[in-house]
């Protein structure tokens, strides 16, 4: 293939020299001889390691142990007790999934430990052909294509299959598939595939893997459009952000978003080698570096090099004077004043500071000492000043030069420092760079790849993207205050033991009260007095002992449990009870108003003349409001058109009436009852007024009769 490619290039280019033709021919020979190929020795494991791998897969004996620990059973519990507990958990009439989730978590944690042991033994040291002779491992470890997950699935085992972050669900009969026994606790029945693609998988394992692959296909079909729309929204919001000539990032209306792009003004793609780890490489290739970054016929005096070096020397002198080692220190009179009022609200501290006199402020300023001089890139223009680099980069360059000065360097350190200054100036972001679109693409492209790569890792729990796109939508589009899947990344200090790490994980994990309760009882008492009646509930909680709990929650003390119950649980219970009482009171009032409204309707139905059904159907709300006024020809035509439009949407109104929620119905009854009460009050007032008028007329007539 390589020779064919080289010959095609050779024939297509007629003006090539003899040297170029020889190079192309040599290229074709190298591709044909040294091309990467994958064959069986690249994938097969050594027999000794393969036997260890097969022995470690036998987890059937540990599955029962995991169930006993999860459900707090005795160590000698037989198979019938285990099945009974499993049946009660999976066939719970209340539909509670807490024990099932706890069992899945515990089982996956145990299987993950065995997976790590298997992978460490087999991959890649257990292969017949090792890196770099192994072409597949060469592609993976070099970063060309593929990951270690692909190699593990081919040569080792597929591992635990997961659907939406959980193991395959069980039916009411207690089986994940009909071929397994009821409430089988073995990992294989729970979706653990101990086979590999190289030797093939069993039908049951194929079914589990197909389920996970279908989930990946659906996620790809559904979330691809969402990720595309997410990227479009980000692009439309950030397309106006542009780096300006004053090193700021501004929006389309000129508002400042950042005073320095990325807080240092450096282009990420250009400044890859501008770190302390790459200075040795740049020193070895200083001639190439200078040929690329130095301008032609330049003069250092025109680039304010001495001013920049002088400004940096002032910063170093200030650090030596106050014994500060390269960390930012904010010192001022206000900072010293605020230290005396720790815990006080900020607004109050600011008000107290402005109320001080000039002499009092001067005392605090003198106590704080001289402030740190301004940074070089703040004092000088970084676009036309040589050496006006970010403070951290200048510190790294100075440390490297000081370290190399103690040894015999092969290059001129002063020349290398100036070369790094020129390289840093070249690494600055170009004015007019559309940094907003660059940021939007940096977010959108990984999210799209996260969705599309799901199918290639079917069923792998660590490759599940259920939280990927929804999490990005939650952050960028909805901006919800209540995060559904909160997560935190904690960096552990080097040298921390694994036991300490597990302790920190247990302390930061969420513990539910039901995991700590052995049993609880509720006693109800009713108190009947002449004026008041109430119910009293006595809740008694019995906690599990430390040895009776599961291992991950044994660290919490009983005193702390009772403290949290008094501080949080009692308040929650009180709030729930008060909310429930209020709901019951509102419901009783609503029922009373419904009954009153029905009685009123029955009482007024006899007085009014019954209308024909045809007349009710034909009259609209506007006609009823008009009091039945006669309409002309145009008015009748408009009324008829209105009735026709209403008839077209009659089905839609029926559907809306069906799906109307109970709350809306109750609100409707409340409005109707309120209106009926107001109408009854108006009728009562009118009747009283008529009665008063009739009594007054009768009194006047009697007076006239007496006078006559």
Image (tube, grey):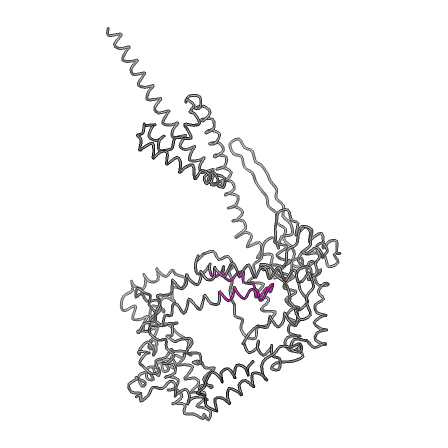
Q: Position of residue 419 (x, y in %)?
A: 38, 86
379 left or right, relative to 213: left
Above or below 287: residue 473: above
Quarter of the rendering occupied by the N terminus: bottom right
Prevailing SS of the magenta stretch? helix
Q: Where on the picture, by quarter, is residue 668?
A: top left
Q: Where on the picture, by quarter, is residue 38?
A: bottom right
Which range is magenta? 448-472
Viewer-proximal residue among 471 and 230: 230
Q: Position of residue 235 (x, y in %)?
A: 40, 64
Number of numbered markers:
0
17 left or right, relative to 503: left
Viewer-proximal residue among 8 and 221: 8
Residue 529 magenta-highlighted = no
Residue 89 at least partly seen? no
Q: Residue at x 36, y 27 (%)?
A: 682
Viewer-proximal residue among 567 and 598: 598
Q: Where on the picture, by quarter, is residue 697?
A: top left
């Amino acid at each position: 293939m390589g020779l064919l490619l080289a010959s095609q290039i050779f024939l297509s280019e007629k003006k090539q020299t003899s040297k170029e033709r020889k190079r192309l021919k040599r290229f074709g020979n190298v591709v044909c001889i040294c091309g990467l190929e994958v064959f069986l020795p690249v994938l097969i494991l050594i027999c000794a390691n393969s036997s260890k791998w097969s022995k470690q897969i036998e987890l059937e004996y540990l599955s029962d142990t995991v169930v006993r620990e999860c459900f707090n059973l005795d160590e000698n519990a037989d198979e019938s007790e285990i099945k009974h507990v499993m049946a009660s958990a999976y066939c719970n009439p209340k539909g509670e999934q807490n024990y099932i989730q706890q069992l899945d978590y515990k089982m996956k944690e145990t299987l993950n430990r065995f997976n790590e042991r298997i992978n460490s033994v087999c991959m890649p040291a257990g292969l017949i052909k090792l890196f770099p002779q192994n072409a597949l491992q060469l592609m993976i470890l070099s970063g060309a294509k593929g990951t270690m997950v692909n190699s593990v699935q081919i040569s080792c085992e597929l591992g635990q299959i997961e659907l939406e972050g959980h193991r395959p669900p069980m039916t009411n009969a207690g089986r994940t598939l009909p071929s397994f026994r009821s409430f089988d606790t073995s990992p294989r029945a729970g979706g653990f595939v101990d086979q590999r693609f190289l030797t093939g998988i069993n039908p049951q394992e194929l079914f589990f893997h197909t389920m996970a692959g279908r989930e990946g296909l659906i996620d790809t079909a559904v979330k691809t459009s969402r990720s595309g729309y997410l990227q479009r929204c980000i692009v439309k919001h950030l397309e106006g952000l542009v780096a300006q000539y004053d090193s700021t990032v501004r929006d389309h209306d000129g508002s400042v978003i950042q005073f320095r792009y990325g807080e240092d003004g450096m282009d990420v793609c250009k400044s890859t080698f501008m770190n302390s780890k790459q200075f040795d490489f740049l020193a070895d290739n200083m001639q190439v570096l200078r040929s690329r970054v130095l301008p032609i016929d330049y003069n250092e005096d025109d680039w304010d090099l001495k001013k920049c070096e002088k400004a940096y020397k002032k910063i170093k002198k200030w650090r030596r004077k106050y014994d500060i080692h390269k960390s930012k220190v904010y010192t001022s009179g206000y900072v010293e004043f605020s230290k005396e009022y720790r815990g006080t609200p900020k607004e109050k501290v600011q008000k107290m500071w402005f109320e001080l006199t000039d002499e009092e402020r001067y005392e605090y300023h003198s106590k704080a000492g001289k402030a740190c001089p301004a940074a070089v890139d703040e004092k000088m223009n970084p676009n036309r000043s040589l050496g006006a680099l970010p403070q951290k980069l200048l510190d790294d360059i100075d440390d490297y030069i000081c370290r190399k000065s103690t040894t015999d360097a092969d290059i001129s350190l002063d020349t290398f420092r100036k070369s790094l200054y020129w390289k840093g100036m070249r690494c600055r972001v170009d004015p007019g760079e559309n940094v907003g679109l660059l940021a939007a693409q940096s977010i959108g492209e990984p999210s799209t790849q996260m969705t599309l790569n799901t199918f290639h890792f079917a069923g792998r729990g660590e490759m599940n993207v259920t939280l990927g796109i929804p999490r990005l939508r939650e952050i960028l589009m909805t901006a919800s205050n209540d995060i559904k899947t909160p997560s935190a990344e904690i960096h552990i200090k080097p040298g921390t033991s694994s036991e300490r790490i597990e302790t920190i994980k247990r302390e930061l994990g969420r513990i539910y009260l039901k995991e700590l309760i052995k049993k609880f009882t509720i006693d109800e008492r009713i108190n009947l007095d002449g004026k008041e009646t109430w119910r009293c509930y006595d809740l008694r909680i019995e906690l599990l002992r430390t040895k009776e709990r599961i291992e991950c929650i044994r660290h919490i003390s009983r005193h702390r449990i009772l403290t949290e119950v008094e501080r949080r649980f009692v308040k929650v219970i009180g709030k729930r009870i008060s909310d429930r009482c209020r709901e019951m009171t509102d419901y009783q009032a609503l029922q009373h108003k419904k009954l009153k409204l029905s009685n009123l309707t029955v009482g007024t139905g006899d007085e009014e003349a019954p209308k024909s059904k045809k007349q009710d159907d034909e009259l609209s709300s506007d006609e009823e409001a008009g009091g039945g006024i006669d309409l002309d020809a145009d008015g009748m035509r408009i009324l008829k058109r209105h009735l026709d439009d209403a008839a077209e949407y009659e089905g839609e109104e029926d559907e809306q009436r069906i799906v109307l929620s109970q709350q809306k119905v109750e609100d409707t009854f409340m409005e109707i009852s309120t209106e009926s009460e107001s109408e009854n009050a108006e009728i009562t007032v009118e009747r009283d007024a008529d009665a008063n008028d009739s009594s007054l007329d009768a009194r006047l007539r009697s007076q006239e009769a007496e006078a006559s």
